[in-house]
Image: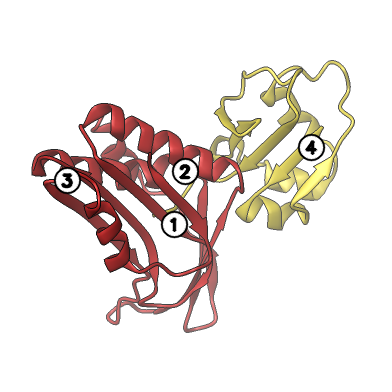
Amino acid sequence: MARIVVGPADFDAGAELAHLSDHAAGGIGSFIGIVRADPSAPRRVAALTLEHYPGMTEAALEKIAAQAESRWPLTGCTIIHRVGRLLPGDNIVFVGAASPHREAALAATAFLIDWLKTAAPFWKYQEYDNGEAEWVAARESDERAAQSWA
Amino acid sequence: MKVLYFAWLRERIGAASEDLDLPADIATVGALVEWLKSRGPAHASAFAGDKIVRCAVDQEFASLDAPIAAAREIAFFPPVTGG
């Protein structure tokens, strides 16, 4: 039932929300992640490249969506994750969950993004405006956020 | 057996994948890591801090003691950072 998309193409958040509202939903929760370039940081992010593991990444997202669907009464569930080189302000990820009730829609949305960050094979490579570049390190706080749903 | 590398492991090893004939006594992910380290300085460097390398056996997350005898594809990568 879940809609899972992994690829370089941008998404239209309005169209995705409209798709979720086609179902018998009383409410829709959604989260959109975008490339951040903190203007006060000593070096600004110039680009973010996302690498993934074709096949395993889609399967991992299906599994996360299935867990959300078994935990809350969802009428729709969408995960879209972009890959490739993105620029500040670009969309990275869309998650959405529709349910007859707002608690379920909001909780499932948070669950989807928390688990996506720790259980789906994606890796971020960050380029800075001073010419430096590095692979982004995993954050313990992301792991704790996912474990809080256990 | 097909071995895949992602992110900085791919860069350090200089290849996204390798088709390898493993010795028959390599039974687990951990044993495979030790064997890969012996293949040269690039592999040794990529696996030097093997605590922060993660693994998947046939596209399922796996631990160092996971068996690999029946595996078709084994992947090594850093902790994930999507979202």
Of the residues shown, which amino acid type is indicated by label 1? Answer: His
Q: Is residue B26 above or below residue A98?
A: above
Q: Secondary structure at mark 1?
A: strand
Closer to viewer: mark 2 or mark 1: 1
Q: Which residue is mark 3?
A: A25
For the N terminus of chain A, the image quarter is top left
Q: Colour of chain A?
A: red
Q: Secondary structure at mark 3?
A: loop
Task: Compute the Cα span from label 1 to label 4.
Answer: 26 Å
Nearest the viewer among A14 and B75 is A14
Q: Are marks 2 and 1 on the same chain?
A: yes
Q: Residue at x 78, y 54 (%)?
A: B15
Q: Are marks 2 and 4 on the same chain?
A: no
Q: Which residue is mark 1?
A: A81
On screen, residue A85 versus residue B29, left or right, reads left
On screen, residue A47 versus residue B35, left or right, reads left
Q: Are marks 3 and 4 on the same chain?
A: no
Task: Compute the Cα span from label 2 to label 3.
Answer: 27 Å
Nearest the viewer among B60 and A146 is B60
Closer to viewer: mark 1 or mark 4: 1
Q: Which residue is mark 4?
A: B2
Asked if disc 2 and disc 1 are in contact, CB closer than 8 Å, the reply is yes
